[in-house]
């Protein structure tokens, strides 16, 4: 398994918490959806027609909004799940092969709901996970493929067009506790990363299983008859953190991940081609986030990954410039009335709007001051 000798490069560059005032943001709106905590919020980066559309999940409800000029937010649609005890934890935008916008949501009951955002109707439901779903992500290069990370210690790859579970990433080399986060590599279509409560980040390759991915698009029989394959061994295992890892995203070939120790870490996996699973980690940068010591707080980036925004348990948001070294704190956002833990942020396409969803059921909109 991977040994992590951090000393491949020089010391990690740690960002200073003195805000550079590179960009100022002001609160332009806040909404209260209800009493249930909101766990996820996301802009639609899949379809250029809807870059200003975002969705939230909380309780058994999925709500779709549009950001308008002047700080206004319009409610477009709401989907309420038939199971009133469902508590959605995650959502991801996807689209069918014909371009229909879809919202994929999952949560405590382990069923993935694929919702047609045009009709507000259920397009498909995926049953397969044995426990709750902590995160869903869409393959931007093929937006009818989604990954789900579950408490059942597995990651599953689904085709939202045909309803097929193509691959299950679990088994001998898989996670040993809840999987909390997952992400597709931005350019290497075969590569994914996952992380969880076993304190590890695992990198997996779908290369030798890709024929099954292709078959899933043309499959005409029942989805249950598809020869779903197990991927048992990751190509790389990283022990960058000493506690739960609850959010991971690729930044090119580098990985951003966070645990419950008040920082986001940027690191490079150094794989040895001849021996999968082995290698070293080069820790490149650290982005401090004070009071970010509870789990299930997720960060977000603008479309081009120029910046990252993350909330904390006190309702503050830290916005870091991702690609400068050492990291530069663009802004620290705080409002006297926002005191509840921020479970997730959503940065707009160009980063000029930052949304946050909170434990108290509120949504906050911050806009860059021109």
Image (spheres, rainbow, N blue to C red):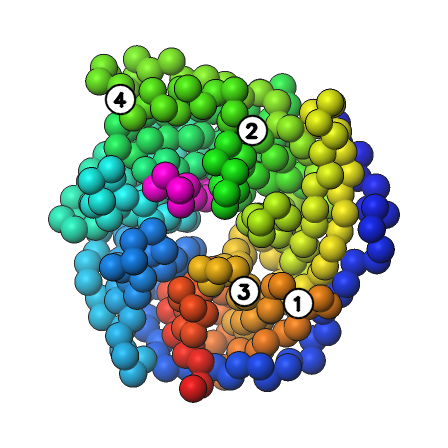
356 relative position to 197: left or right: left
In whole angstroms, how far apart are the C-alphas of marks 3 and 4?
37 Å
**Label 2: which secondary element:** strand
Q: Nearer the viewer, residue 341 or 248?
A: 248
Q: How far, Cα to Cα, is label 3 from label 1?
A: 9 Å
Residue furthest to the bottom in view is 370
Do residues under tags 1 and 2 come within 8 Å of each other at their CB atoms? no
Q: CA distance from mark 4 to mark 2?
A: 22 Å
Whichever of labels 3 and 1 marks the residue nearer the N terminus, that label is 3
Distance Cα–Cα, label 1 vs label 4: 44 Å
Instruction: Decide which of tag 1 and tag 4 comes sooner along the chain.
Output: 4
Label 2 or label 3, whichever comes before in sequence order:
2
Classify mark 3: residues with Cα within 10 Å, few (<14), some (14-19) or many (20+).
some
Residue 84 seen by the camera: no
Structural distance between the alpha carbons of marks 2 and 3: 26 Å
Q: Looking at the image, which is closer to me, 25 or 90?
A: 25
Please give the residue where the numbered disc 4 appears in the rendered image. Answer: 218
Q: Quadrant of residue 226?
A: top left
Q: Secondary structure at mark 3?
A: loop
* Tag 4–tag 2 contact (CB < 8 Å): no
Percent of width and height locating residue 346 = 43, 63
Residue shown at 63% from the left, 74% from the top: 329
| Residue at image mark 3 | 306
């Amino acid at each position: 398994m991977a040994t992590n000798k951090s000393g491949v490069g020089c010391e990690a560059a740690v960002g200073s918490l003195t805000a550079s005032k590179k960009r100022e943001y002001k609160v332009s709106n806040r909404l209260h959806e209800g009493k249930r905590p909101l766990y996820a919020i996301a802009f639609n980066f899949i379809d250029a027609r809807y870059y200003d559309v975002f969705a939230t999940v909380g309780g058994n409800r999925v709500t779709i909004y549009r950001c308008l000029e002047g700080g206004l937010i319009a409610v477009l649609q709401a989907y309420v799940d038939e199971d009133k005890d469902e508590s959605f934890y995650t959502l991801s935008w996807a689209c069918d092969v014909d371009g229909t916008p879809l919202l994929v949501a999952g949560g405590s009951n382990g069923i993935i709901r694929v919702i047609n955002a045009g009709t507000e109707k259920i397009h498909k439901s995926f049953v397969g996970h044995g426990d709750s779903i902590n995160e869903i992500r869409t393959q931007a290069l093929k937006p009818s493929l989604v990954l789900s990370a579950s408490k059942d210690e597995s990651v599953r790859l689904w085709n939202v067009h045909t309803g097929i579970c193509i691959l299950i990433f679990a088994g001998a080399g898989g996670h040993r506790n809840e999987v909390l986060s997952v992400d597709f590599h931005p350019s290497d279509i075969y590569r994914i990363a996952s992380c969880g409560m076993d304190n590890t980040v695992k990198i997996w390759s779908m290369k030798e299983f890709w024929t099954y991915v292709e078959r899933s698009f043309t499959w005409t029989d029942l989805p249950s008859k598809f020869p779903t394959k197990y991927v048992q061994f990751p190509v790389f295992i990283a022990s960058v953190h000493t506690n739960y890892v609850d959010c991971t995203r690729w930044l090119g070939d580098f990985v951003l991940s966070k645990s419950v120790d008040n920082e986001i870490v940027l690191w490079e996996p150094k794989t040895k081609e001849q021996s999968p699973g082995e290698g070293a980690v080069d820790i490149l940068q650290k982005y401090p986030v004070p009071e970010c010591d509870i789990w299930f707080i997720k960060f977000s980036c603008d479309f081009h990954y120029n910046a990252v925004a993350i909330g904390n348990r006190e309702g503050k948001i830290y916005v870091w410039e991702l690609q400068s070294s050492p990291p530069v704190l663009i802004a620290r956002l705080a409002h006297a009335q926002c005191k509840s833990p921020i479970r997730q942020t959503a940065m707009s396409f160009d980063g000029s709007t930052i949304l946050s969803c909170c434990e108290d059921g509120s949504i906050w909109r911050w806009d860059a001051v021109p």
